Image (tube, rainbow, N blue to C red):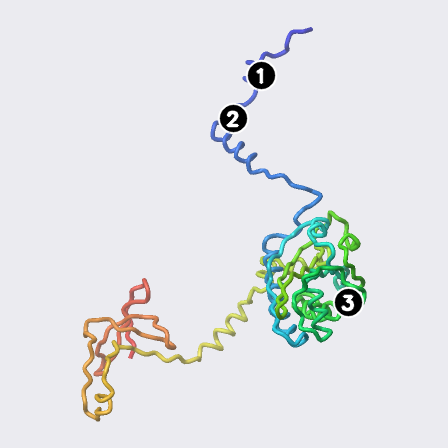
């Protein structure tokens, strides 16, 4: 039979009509859908990446203090970026030749990489051998002897790195390999997610980049500690601790003072002051005065008299109006 069971009009009558506003919402929902690459998923949230940035920024400050003592010259380490990418993309972005070391971390049960570009690596070798450590113009691969010398420098780096991680997890590092060609370093599958941390090193007159390739699978056991929500839930203060804190500080005394407008005076007039002299101020009796607590202005008030004593009546606290006397 070639005849259609239902015509187009009959099919349209059977289907529920979608209101215009709901149809618009559906189109908007489809526009918000973004492609997701399951071979390169983002394993860390923005909050966790931000926490990693703060940790590695502190590491940069610590290393900036340690290197001048070791290299006997002015040194500075500045964090440039912290980002997620695949291990293959990280390796493709490295120069060839370069200087890259594989480092094992026992507690984290994994291997990460530290890379120094050739210019700064050879300059460090020159300084550690007694030279001036000037910037290198001829880029070449480091020799085996030079790699051993650079490993001594990186030992200072890994010691500071372990110290930076200590609030979250304690681990010891061990160098398990070194190469000058990135393609020969295979610590992960190319599609595995890593966190790439890039630093700029300034050692004497020489300048170059250092990067740390940190596989996400290494710190999955401590990844929850990077979550701000987890930190918030763990840092909640109990009511008993709050009451104890309030009880402890309730006896602390603060100085409460009232200030009038300052009056300029010549040194000769100040030297001539004597008991019984009257100082005239420019402060009108109707003008509010500032009331400070612990040296900080918290209220405004006006001068008044109470039980034959000069007092200040509080009239304003920011936007809140009320009256209270301060003797």
Do residues under tags 1 and 3 come within 8 Å of each other at their CB atoms? no
**Residue 136 on image: x %, y %:** 68, 64
Residue tagged 1 = 11
**Residue 221 on image: x %, y %:** 71, 59
Q: Is mark 2 on a helix, strand or loop?
A: loop
Residue tagged 2 = 18
Q: Is residue 172 visible from the viewing direction of this image?
A: no
Residue at screen point 61% across, 12% down: 6
Lower sequence index among marks 1 and 2: 1
Find the distance from the CA under tag 1 to the CA under tag 3: 79 Å
Find the distance from the CA under tag 1 to the CA under tag 2: 14 Å
Q: Mark 1: give few (<14), some (14-19) or many (20+) Cα within 10 Å.
A: few
Q: What element carries label 1?
A: helix
Quarter that holds the N terminus? top right
Of tags 1 and 3, the one toward the viewer is 3
Residue that protrudes farthest toward the front in the picture:
138
Q: Nearer the viewer, residue 191 or 320?
A: 191
- Please give left or right for residue 74 compared with residue 39 in the image: left
Residue at screen point 70% across, 61% down: 138
Residue 93, placed above or below residue 289: above
**Residue 164 on image: x %, y %:** 65, 68
Residue tagged 3 = 146
Quarter that holds the C terminus? bottom left
Residue at screen point 65% across, 41% down: 36
The quadrant in which residue 225 appears is bottom right
Q: Is residue 246 visible from the viewing direction of this image?
A: yes
Lower sequence index among marks 2 and 3: 2
Q: Which of 323 and 98 is in front in this view?
A: 98
Find the distance from the CA under tag 2 to the CA under tag 3: 72 Å
Q: Mark 3: give few (<14), some (14-19) or many (20+) Cα within 10 Å.
A: some
Do residues under tags 1 and 2 come within 8 Å of each other at their CB atoms? no
């Amino acid at each position: 039979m070639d005849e259609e069971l239902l015509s187009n009009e009959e099919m349209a009558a059977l289907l529920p009509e979608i209101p215009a506003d709901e149809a618009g919402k559906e189109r908007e929902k489809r526009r918000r859908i973004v492609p997701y690459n399951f071979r390169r998923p983002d394993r860390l949230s923005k909050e966790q990446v931000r926490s990693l940035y703060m940790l590695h920024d502190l590491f940069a400050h610590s290393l900036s203090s340690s290197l001048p003592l070791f290299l006997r010259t002015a040194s500075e380490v500045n964090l440039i970026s912290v980002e997620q990418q695949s291990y293959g993309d990280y390796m493709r972005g490295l120069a060839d030749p370069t200087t890259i070391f594989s480092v094992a971390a026992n507690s984290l049960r994994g291997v990460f990489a530290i890379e120094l570009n050739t210019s700064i690596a050879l300059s460090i070798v020159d300084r550690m051998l007694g030279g001036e450590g000037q910037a290198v113009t001829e880029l070449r691969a480091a020799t085996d002897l030079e790699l051993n010398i650079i490993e001594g420098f990186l030992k200072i780096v890994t010691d500071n790195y372990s110290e930076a991680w200590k609030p979250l997890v304690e681990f010891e590092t061990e160098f398990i390999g070194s190469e000058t060609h990135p393609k020969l370093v295979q610590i992960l599958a190319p599609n595995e997610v890593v966190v790439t941390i890039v630093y700029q090193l300034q050692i004497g007159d020489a300048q170059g980049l250092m990067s740390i390739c940190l596989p996400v699978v290494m710190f999955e056991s401590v990844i929850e500690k990077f979550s701000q929500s987890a930190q918030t839930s763990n840092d909640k203060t109990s009511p008993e601790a709050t009451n104890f804190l309030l009880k402890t500080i309730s006896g602390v005394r603060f100085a409460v003072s009232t200030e009038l407008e300052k009056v300029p005076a010549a040194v000769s007039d100040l030297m001539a002051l004597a008991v019984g002299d009257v100082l005239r101020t420019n402060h009108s009796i109707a003008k509010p005065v500032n009331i400070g607590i612990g040296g900080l202005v918290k209220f405004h008030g006006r001068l008044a008299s109470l039980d034959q004593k000069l007092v200040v009546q509080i009239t304003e606290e920011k936007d809140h109006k009320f009256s209270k006397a301060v003797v």
